[in-house]
Image (cartoon, helix red, strand yellow):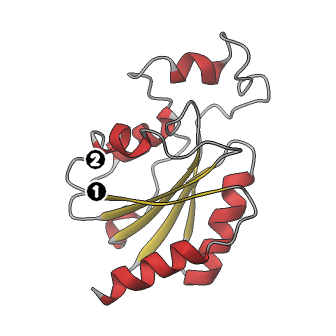
Amino acid sequence: MRKPLIAVFSAQGNTMKVGKKLAEKLSCPLYAIKAKEPYTAADLDWNNAHSRSSVEMHNPASRPDLADTNAPIADHDVIFLGFPIWWYIAPTIINTFLEHYDFSGKTVILFATSGGSGFGKAKEHLQASAPKATFLEGAVLRGSDDVQALVDMYTQLAKA
């Protein structure tokens, strides 16, 4: 039997809402990925080239510190990894998260929230941070979308 975990980074709460819905539907734990230094509204201003998020996203080597390193990754074989889309990829804190834990042999199902863009190169950028994991693109949701496509994906995976 597969054991899923929902791990979510949510700077403004939108992705966390989706993660909570998914955790409820799958009856599994939810883990919040948090930055050691929380993001402020000014940090998230993508129109400001000097905002924290703009600086991080323009530096592929950026690895914001995690608030904690208590994610129960070792206890789960399927990790739903949720994040907002920033500049057509995942925020670099997701790379920090993936590089901190051993994802060997795990299936990582990506899901994201976005106002209009798709996954872009998110999967490609994240695979390098956990090369021994299998990455699958789940769904890009618009905040309040139904998570049923992700539930169905998990159901199919659990049957395999």
| Residue at x 67%, y 69% (from the top left corner) | 20
- Please say if 136 is above or below 120: below
Q: Residues within 10 Å of mark 1 (few under 14, many from 20)?
A: many
Residue 30: x percent and y percent? 57, 67
List the residue tagged with mark 1: 103
Q: At x 33% / y 50%, what residue is drawn?
A: 101
Write down the quadrant of residue 104 in the picture. bottom left
Percent coordinates x, y for residue 57 in the rendering: 52, 24
- Report how far apart the C-alphas of labels 1 and 2 lie in the structure: 6 Å
In this view of the protein, which residue sits in the foreground, 121 or 56? 121
- On the rendered structure, is 2 left or right of 32? left
Image quarter where the C terminus lies is bottom left
Q: Are marks 1 and 2 in contact (CB under 8 Å)?
A: yes
Image coords of residue 135 (percent x, y)? 33, 57
Q: Nearer the viewer, residue 13 or 68?
A: 13
- Residue 130's label in the rendered image is 2
Question: What residue sits 50% from the left and 17% below the top?
Answer: 58
Which residue reaches farthest right? 41
Give the total of numbered labels. 2
* Residue 111 screen position, x and y as percent: 53, 58
Three-letter amino acid code of the residue under disc 1 = Phe
Q: Secondary structure at mark 1?
A: loop
Amino acid on which the number 2 mark rests in the picture: Ala
